Image (tube, rainbow, N blue to C red):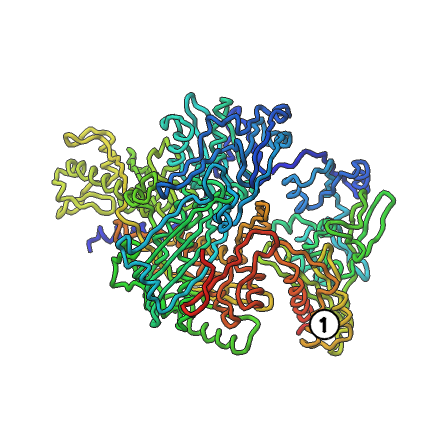
Amino acid sequence: MTAVEDRAEDRAEIGRARRRKEDRHLLTGATTWTDNLTLPGMLHLAILRSPMAHARIRSIDVAPARHRPGVVAAFSGRDFADSQGTIPCAWPVTPDMVNPGHPSLAVEQVNHVGEAVAVVAARDKASAQDALEAIEVEYEPLPVVLDMPTALAEGSDKVHPHTESNRSFVWTFESGAAGTGEPISDALASAEVTVRRRFIQQRLIPSFMEPRSTVVQPTGDGFTMWSATQIPHILRTMLALTLDVPEHKVRVVAPDVGGGFGGKLQVTPEEVITALVARRLGKPAKYTETRSESLLSAHHGRDQIQDITVTARRDGTVTGLDVHLLADMGAYLRLVSPGVPILGAFMFNAIYKFPAYRFVCEGVFTNKTPTDAYRGAGRPEATFAVERIMDELAHELGTDPLELRRKNWIRHEEFPFTTVAGLTYDSGNYEAATERALELIGWDELKREQAERRERHDPVQLGLGISTFTEMCGLAPSRVLGSLDYAAGGWENAGIRVLATGKVEVVTGASAHGQGHETAWSQIVADQLGVPFEDVEVIHGDTQSSPKGLDTYGSRSLTVGGIAVVKAAEKVVAKARRIAAHLLEASEDDLDFAGGKFTVRGVPGGGKTIQEVAFAAFTAHDLPDGIEPSLDADATFDPENFSFPHGTHLCAIEVDTETGFAKIRKYICVDDIGQVINPLIVEGQVHGGLAQGIAQALYEEAVYDSDGNLTTGTFVDYLVPSASDLPSFVTDRTTSPSTTNPLGVKGVGEAGTIASTPAVVNAVVDALRPFGVDDVQMPCTPERIWRAIAQGAEKSDRAAEGTVAYGGASTSTADGSDGDQL
Amino acid sequence: MIPASFDYVRPATAAEAVQALAQAGEDAKVLAGGQSLLPILRLRLAYPSTLVDLGRIDELTGVSDDGDAIVIGAMTTHDAVLHDPLVAEHAPLLAQATRTVADRQVRHLGTFGGSLAHADPAGDLPAVALALDAELRVLGESGQRSVPAREFFLDYLTTALGPAEILTSIRIPKLGAGWFCHYEKFNRVAQAWSIVGVAAVVRRSDGRIDEARIGLTNMGSTPLRARAVEQALAGAEVSVAAVTEACARAAEATTPPSDLSARADYREHLAAVLSRRAVLAAAGI
């Protein structure tokens, strides 16, 4: 190794646990949230929301609100009926998918509690809020449709009168027909063992920290929108189409955005309403939701009924997986509502070598808040179902759940591996991650303690849960999205500008809202160009300054956006090399580039730094012929494949059988996310992800009463855990570099959420096996656990009477009774 | 989250506060720490005409020694209660229960008197006041009166306070030698309200429980005393078996709610389990 390379090695930024450069600004209150923005003459909006889940609007009179102090205007849906268009759905998953249309302000009918029916614009927010009370609405109640099986039953009341039924779509994949495996019918017919379960994915609320906020400034024949959004670029295009404003007349800015978790991956009715009012009045307008409005009307997540059948031979070899989902769309289809469960279609088979596989998903309308992306989007649901059913199969076979997994998973030497769902997994080593996790948690010791507690009938029982997961990250190869009928591509764009002084600006289309892009991108560029980390500035979140992009969701930023940065940097270096060769009077081929400096091979000393080359490009006094005076470069990267992180998560949980309270004692995760840019950021993503996945297992649930009111409408009832409710996580990593991108990175934003939920529920069920319990519905509340123990099986409904809940634990084996099938 | 408009008064003395309430009439509300009232106002679930803010009345804060009792000003914050040496010495049960109230931010603003006057049956401190046989001092237009805790809580969010009365202080008899106590709270996440809570105060000597006072949180529309358990414990042996048997009666004469957090039968079960745990912990078993 030469001395130059040594120095370069010392300075390597990739892999350094740097503190995030954005945190000083974010943590000291120096942020610019959308709600902090005040424009001259700006009006403040308040929105009147439906108290009814399903009703015709017999009459609505906004006139009295107009006479309230401070009020400038008030509108109902009728005032915008011709101009508001419909909230777009970009993912028509089947050609015959029923999309009933989604007005931003209800016109004829309301279809869920919290739907916007009128808006007041006033000189201050308090006046707008007060004036809502003057609006008179007469509702004619309609029968409320809440439960999915009931909604699909023959003759059911319909959410939308002009549709034939409450079914939006049926999406099917079958390995025999697709040519990716054997026919599922053969597997079902010839099964030695069959295990069936119905699992409920409860409805969740993304609960991002910053409530949504939008400011719109009319600009001649267009407008500028600031919004708390994950997707400024997609939002711009969609607003242009929805409101019939030419795209080049629309600018969208996502300033500091306080979290999203998929909840801000949306074109919201509130954004459209704010634009409509601002343009109608010719004045800037702001709408900021309250936390209550956010929980009620920002889109929800999950909400599936999963009927899962696994078939196997007596020796434990799995032979087939049959999945039938009901996915609750809520009252309307939003941006990617139908696509969320479909993303799971490729993940139910997970890390296992199922020879046959079928996936059927029905999208169902109900009188509830629409569902859409929530951290993991389709993949947590899939991972939960397969990891739970593997435990049930192990129990049925009387074998160890870990052994069953080992017997059926893809071995490390089998990568790349094309699955029964048709995806090709790039790399992985399930054996290594699992061994490391077992070692870290002290598995054998815990097993012994569990046996002892069972032996002495200790009131506190110990449960051990496993989740060996994989997921698809880096949404997405554009042609794959095309084959799934998604309306956009999956590429990402980056630009690099090298300034006269050698400082660097990186423009990215990945719109950060808490992830740490500014730090990670700076680390990548520092290594690529050999410039100091501090010399890099990252620009994002404004369609004017970062004009091309497809934004941040689906663990895509690094694996797609980060690679675009690398590609742009390669172009910068190539341009610089030509200028450096000219300045050094050498052939390009004889130049080495390391540590930010071009040197002539075999010639000691001398050379030109990238900063010197940048200055030469800036002055343009002495450039080779035909070279433009700039090092700047753009790149757009479209991945050829997804990347497939994986990991083994182990959970040890103590269940107090007297009260039903479950407390996690130890949580270990060993994730394999390929190469790591910044281990500190990765750690943060994993911790937060685990908290949200554990929250689904133990705490969070959006509950509606029989009238369709959200009864968990505040954080008193919708239980988001805090640090005091969670254990100290033990994390580690194995590294199987991705083979689908030059950095070898995979993606980590959703891993913790996807993996942890089944680890926790498997642990709870494991603790309760001696009581004859084989399932506990999520969230595994103390009351549900207590009732499960009391009844020997989970048959408890939601704690409160009159709420909509699914009672259906259903089991059948080859020699047992049939379960409830849809 | 903007409340409807209201008039606002911030008196400097307790007497002025009473006067302000009397003048403002029935739709006035007292603002103490605001931790329950402000959310209600912001959600527009209440429309008071006037708020009488007790926040600047010095005479309503602090803890003092009153011979055989300590006296806690109604506007003393949870955090101040938690760190007060007199409370720690003479009413450790109150300190222990206060530590479980909501979160740090709420404890710095919320007040002991406010949580008693609000009388939410899911609140922890009313049951503690019952178990400690606290005496509540009330100031009205006709002067000062005292109300024993057992007569103070009338119904859900309803107390013996008249419309122009304020709670000024709480007198808590000192627990002498031989008394032991424990608060057992059951909730799902750290900052949540109690699903059920049990405040146990026991006096023991020579391997026997001489006297027990058991307060129950969230087992009815008001905080309750578990009289059946208290009777069964009086004179009982200090043993797991005896305590378990006595505490099995914890739900007798209670009417626990069925709500989103728990159904009534589960609360009844919890009351027995938590009473047993509270008494055993208090008795040092």
For the image shown, how many numbered marks are present on the structure? Answer: 1
Residue A357 visible (yes or no)? yes
In-front residue for pair A469/A822: A822
Q: Chain of mark 1?
A: B
In-front residue for pair B85/A124: A124
- Report the residue that reaches farthest toward the right: B142
Whether residue A40 sits left or right of residue A406 in the image: it is right
The correct choice, above or below, for A426 with respect to A596 in the image is below
For disc 1, the marked residue is B246
Residue A510 image point, x, y percent: 36, 41
Q: Residues within 10 Å of mark 1 (few under 14, many from 20)?
A: many
Whether residue A257 sits left or right of residue B65 in the image: it is left
Secondary structure at numbered mark 1 = helix
In-front residue for pair A763/B23: A763
**Which image quadrant is residue A313 in?**
bottom left
In-front residue for pair A693/A325: A325
